[in-house]
Amino acid sequence: RVLVTGCNGQIGQVLVPALRARYGADNVLDSDLRGNVSATLDVTDVAALMAMIQKFQPTQIYHLAAVLSATGEKDPVRAWQVNLNGYFNILEAAVACGVKQVFFPSTIAVYGPDAPREATPDSAPTRPTTIYGIAKAAGENLAAWYRKKHDLDVRVLRYPGIIGWESAPGGGTTDYAVEIFHAAVRGEAFKCPLGPDRALPMLAMQDAIRGTIEFMEAAPETILQASGYNLGGFSAAPADFAGEILRANPDFRIEYAPDHRDAIAASWPEGLDDTSARRDWGWQPQYDLATLSAAMLGHISASVAASAADAA
Ligand code: VAH
């Protein structure tokens, strides 16, 4: 039985159906602070969290609830409360209630300006410069502590920017990489909050979901890095996405207006080395820039056409 937190987020909206397809709908409990979920859950409310876990008795928890990088810089207190205290509550409740496995999503935001810019390895220094990254880096170390101290099977992946047609992102620095495709399909000019050459590690949502479930199902003896693995896909800058869109839609227009998110992105690596994940538990991404971009335009266009047909 699986409890998922943060289900209304960009990843949660796609992960829950994938887990239900795999384990059965009744065995996956979706929760979030508010909105269209089976269970309302504030992970900073210890008593409520304990009551839910005691009642549902999950064997696994996928803990996605978090405040992302851009929002976190505007509300550091809330970001810390949710991203670290909320996660600490999850770990404590997991130990108290005999949960077998916990998934903790970390991020490339744990790296800072002193990490190698290209092909950043898992072993690079993690000296983040955002509250979000600081909390996630602390969370990675918490995972290692709970593995050692309580033999709790906490598993950590460092996600790049995740791009999918299935859901909208919220509050991240990489949200632009989803929004740009929606603007292109709507025939609207796109105002990009990152500079044209601001390259970041990116990953297709379909790859991220498949990789996460494969990772959680991997034999325990293959998980050799207690504080986590880079999950690499491809490296791309706004100009790269614009180039892919223009090939399909020559009328597409983009304006670059770097803001606070460009400054955050500048502190992160441009590309990841995910050799360890490939070696230890067989990670293999399937989408690259061209195939992801084509899939984004295709799926978004199809859903726009379908909703237009419904409206007619
Ligand atoms: C963010 N999408 O932008 C998240 C992610 C690597 C970026 O952590 O904050």
Image: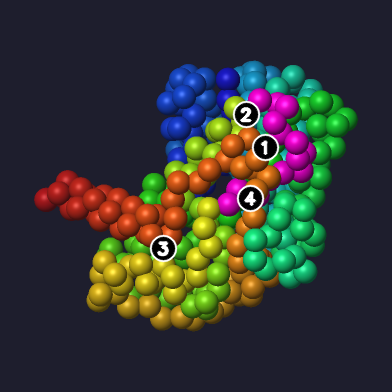
The residue type indicated by label 3 comes to Glu
Query: In the rendered structure, which segment of residues is drawn in magenta?
Result: 219-232
In front of the other: 245 or 71: 245
- Is the residue under label 1 in contact with that under label 2 (CB below 8 Å)? yes
Question: Residue at horizontal 40%, vertical 55%?
Answer: 292
Circle 2 sits in a helix, a strand or a loop, which is it? loop
List the residue tagged with mark 2. 218
Residue lying at 81% horizontally and 32% vertically, measured from the top left: 147
Residue at the limit of the structure toward the right, as seen here: 149
Q: Is residue 185 above or below residue 15?
A: below
- Residue 271 place in picture, x, y as percent: 60, 62
Label 4, on which residue?
274
Q: For the residues carrying marks 3 and 4, which lies nearer the camera in this image?
A: 4
Mark 1 crowd level (few <14, some 14–19, many ≥20, 10 Å Cα):
some
Beta carbon of the mark 4 residue lies under 8 A of ligand 1: no
Spatial CA span between label 3 and label 4: 26 Å
